[in-house]
C-alpha cells in the first residue's frame, strides 16, 4: 500500500478488529453458558412446579443481555477503525483490543456466575419461595460485573485516536 492511501501503522487495525471480535465472542460465550446452565435449572424445576417457570426465567433473560454488551462494544470499535479517513496507530489498536477484552471477559465471567446462581437459585426457589429475592439480588450483582466491563470498554475505546495530534 502506498502512504497516500493508508495512514498510520499498517498492523494496527488487526488489533482493533481483534478487540471487536473478542468483545462479541467472549460476551456471547458468557451469555450462552448462562442461558444454558440456568435453562437446565428452569427445565428441571418446571417438571415439579410448572407454575413457577415464567417467574424463574429471570436468569435466562439476564444472561441474554450479556451478548448485547459485547455487541455494543464491537460496534463502537469497528466504527472507530477507518485508516483511510483518519490515521490509525498501534496505540489506537491496543486501546480497542483492551476495550474488547475488558468487556468480553467481564461478560464471560458474569455469564458463568449467572448460570451457576440461576441454576441453583431456581431449583431452590421451587422448594422455598422466600429465596426468590435473594436469588435476584445475587443475579443483579453478577450482571453488574458485565456492566463494569462495558463501562471500562467504552472508556478505553474512547482513548483511541488520542495518541497523536493529526
Image: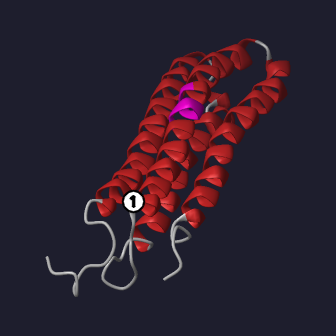
Res 104 seen here:
yes
| Image coordinates for residue 69, horizontal then vertical, percent | 55, 53
| Image coordinates for residue 108, horizontal then vertical, percent | 50, 34
Residue at x 36%, y 85% (from the top left corner):
85
Q: How is the image coloured?
A: secondary structure
| Image coordinates for residue 123, horizontal then vertical, percent | 64, 16
Question: Taken as a whole, is the magenta stretch helix, strand or loop?
Answer: helix
In the foreground, 60 or 72: 72
Residue at x 55%, y 30% (from the top left corner):
109
Left or right of 84 on screen, residue 127: right
Q: Is residue 109 magenta?
A: yes
Using the rendered view, name the quadrant where residue 1 is placed: bottom left
Mark 1: few/some/many CA within 10 Å (<14, 14-19, 20+): some
Res 54 seen here:
no
Badge count: 1
Q: Which residue is mark 1?
A: 90
Q: Which residues, given as a range, are shown in magenta?
A: 108-112
Left or right of 165 on screen, residue 54: right
Residue at x 70%, y 18% (from the top left corner):
126
Q: Is residue 48 magenta?
A: no
Residue extending furthest toward the left:
1
In the foreground, 20 or 48: 20
Amino acid at each position: 500500500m502506498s502512504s497516500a492511501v493508508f495512514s498510520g501503522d499498517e498492523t494496527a487495525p488487526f488489533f482493533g478488529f481483534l478487540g471487536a471480535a473478542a468483545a462479541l465472542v467472549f460476551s456471547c460465550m458468557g451469555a450462552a453458558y448462562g442461558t444454558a446452565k440456568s435453562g437446565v435449572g428452569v427445565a428441571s424445576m418446571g417438571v415439579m412446579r410448572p407454575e413457577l417457570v415464567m417467574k424463574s426465567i429471570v436468569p435466562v433473560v439476564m444472561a441474554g443481555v450479556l451478548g448485547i454488551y459485547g455487541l455494543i462494544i464491537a460496534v463502537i470499535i469497528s466504527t472507530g477503525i477507518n485508516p483511510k479517513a483518519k490515521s490509525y496507530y498501534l496505540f489506537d489498536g491496543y486501546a480497542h483490543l483492551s476495550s474488547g477484552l475488558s468487556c468480553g471477559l467481564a461478560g464471560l465471567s458474569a455469564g458463568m456466575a449467572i448460570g451457576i446462581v440461576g441454576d441453583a437459585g431456581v431449583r431452590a426457589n421451587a422448594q422455598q419461595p422466600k429465596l426468590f429475592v435473594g436469588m435476584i439480588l445475587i443475579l443483579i450483582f453478577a450482571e453488574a460485573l458485565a456492566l463494569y466491563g462495558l463501562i471500562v470498554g467504552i472508556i478505553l475505546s474512547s482513548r483511541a485516536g488520542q495518541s497523536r495530534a493529526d
